[in-house]
Every structure is written in structure tokens, then in C-alpha cells.
Amino acid sequence: MIELKNVDKYYKSRFQRTFILKNVNFTVKEGEFVSIMGPSGAGKSTLLNIIGMLDEPSEGEYYFMGNPVHKMTEKDKNLCHRNYIGFIFQAYHLLEDMNVYENIEMPLVYKGVKGKERKAIVADILDRFNIVAKQDLFPEQLSGGQQQLVGIARAIVARPKLLLADEPTGNLHSEQGRQIMELLKKLNQEEGMTIIQVTHSEQNAKYGTRIVNIMDGYLKEGLANVEGGLRI
Ligand code: ADP
Ligand code: ADP
């Protein structure tokens, strides 16, 4: 489903290039549930954004379902993102001028799901997420945790082929976090949704069927044995 070949990501300043990702080769098959770990600033979000077509590699090739993303126009990338990808952002990225209901409904509108069915799907997910009472509120009226739940509901409501999740439970309390991880596991196992999550939590990482680590821009398979500890 995903193939990154020799991908570099760097930022250019006047005199130098600052590398974020170096020679990343990364393949994800349909149906996998991959956890990306690594210290802060390692390039995890950058990698997820590239996979989600929200950012692009500086060098290298990216194939999504066999299509060369590195050759696509912005318009095609947007279409591809809308049709196949659900994205849970670390900073929620809800549409501020739309209420909870409308935020969650949006991906179904893009997918062309018609009125009655759309209403039923949104009502069901509001109920499952226990946010029915919040449906008329706007994002700024919600707590961080509530915004995160809305962001998760929006990302999965249209059942994307690929779900990308950047610290999906970072702002939830532990029981809610556990329920969301169970939900991702269920979407992966029962519906075959391909999932890639970025997480700092080893416990959450283990919900995945495969763990990769990014360190200093390089990607390695498996759990790293050193956690970047601070001495303060
Ligand atoms: P992680 O998700 O692993 O914490 P990120 O992918 O967010 O890491 O960031 C990796 C590195 O890239 C960080 O050091 C960050 O400061 C740097 N970075 C991100 N965006 C830019 C940018 N637009 N210009 C320069 N450096 C950037
Ligand atoms: P169920 O509600 O089917 O018994 P779980 O007990 O595994 O499923 O639910 C874990 C969390 O995910 C709960 O908050 C539940 O409401 C929610 N959930 C479960 N399945 C779905 C789904 N298909 N779509 C949206 N939310 C779901």
C-alpha cells in the first residue's frame, strides 16, 4: 500500500541543509498496524505528514497503492487524501467555524454519502464516543480531550483505507485512551483498516503488529532499547 524509496527530507537555509529524514526506505502492506516510535524531534510527524500527502519528500520516491505520489499534482494529492486517508492530528486541526456535528460529517460529505445515511452514521459515532451532548458546540468550546475525540471520530467516520494517527491518545485520560486503542485494534482486525500511528507510549505501540523506530532521521525496524532519558 505504501512504499517510500530513498526518501530524504531536509530544510534549506542560506548555507546548509538540515536533514530531518535520511534515506528512509519504508514499506507498509495493506492490513498492517504499524507503530512509529522515537525521541522528540526525530522526524516522526514529518514522516506521517509525508505519508498523508500533507508534506513532500525533498528527495526520493513515494508510491501509494502503486501510484507515484512524487509525480502527482497538489489537486490529485488532495483527492487521494480525501478518498483514502483518515488523519488524526496531534493538534486536532478541527475546522473552527464548524460545530462538532459538521466537523464529523465532513468526510462523509466528501465521500458522497447521502442525507439520511449520513445522519445515521454521524449519530451512531456521536453516541459511541459519548459526545451527543456536544454536537452543537464549536471546537473552541471543548476541552483538549474532547477535541481529540472529535478529531478521532472525524478521521474514522468514513472508514478510510489508511488511518494515520499522530499521538492519538496524547490528551485523553487513561481509560479513554485504552478504549481508543481498542477501537483502533478492532478497526484493524475486523475491518482490515491499515493503520500507522506515532506514539511515545510503549504500551500503545504494542497494539500495533509492527514497531519501527526513528532515530536521528534514520528508520529502523523494532523497538529501540534506549529511551531518551533526561537528567534534570
Ligand atoms: P517528531 O514528530 O519526531 O517530534 P518532527 O517531525 O515534528 O519530529 O520534527 C523533526 C525535526 O524537524 C524537528 O527538529 C523540527 O524542529 C524540524 N522541523 C519541522 N518543520 C520544520 C521546518 N518547517 N523548518 C525547519 N525545521 C523543521
Ligand atoms: P463495541 O461498542 O462495538 O462493543 P468496543 O467496546 O470495543 O466496541 O468499543 C471501544 C470504544 O470504541 C467505545 O468508545 C466504543 O463506543 C467505540 N467504538 C466501537 N466500535 C466503533 C465503531 N465501529 N465506530 C466508532 N466507534 C466505535
Image: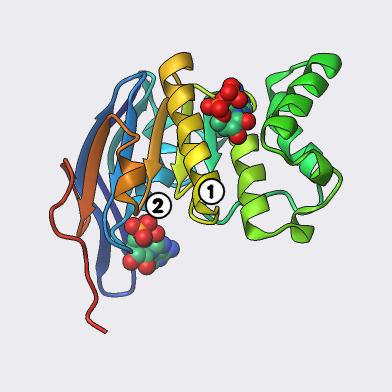
The residue under label 2 is: 45
Give percent across and percent down for residue 133.
83, 43
- The answer to which of marks 2 and 1 sits earlier in the sequence is 2
Q: Quadrant of residue 173?
A: bottom right
Q: Nearer the viewer, residue 63 or 150?
A: 150
Tell me if residue 106 comes above or below residue 220 in the rendering. above
Label 2 residue SS: helix
Q: Nearer the viewer, residue 86 or 149?
A: 149
Tell me if 141 is positioned left or right of 8 in this view: right
The residue under label 1 is: 89
Give the residue type that dot 2 points to. Answer: Ser
Tell me if residue 102 comes above or below residue 76 in the rendering. below
Label 1 residue SS: loop
Report whether the residue tagged 2 is closer than 8 Å to ligand 1.
yes
Residue 79 appears in the picture as rendered = no
> Residues under labels 2 and 1: Cα distance?
9 Å
Rendering quadrant holding ligand 2: top right
Tell me if 53 is positioned left or right of 2 in this view: right
Give percent across and percent down for residue 36.
30, 44
Local crowd at mark 1 within 10 Å, few (<14), some, or many (≥20)?
Answer: many
Residue 195 appears in the picture as rendered = yes
Q: Nearer the viewer, residue 152 or 43?
A: 152
Q: Which quarter of the figure is the C terminus placed in? A: bottom left
Tell me if 70 is positioned left or right of 143 in this view: left
Give the residue type that dot 1 points to. Answer: Phe
Tell me if residue 123 comes above or below residue 223 in the rendering. above
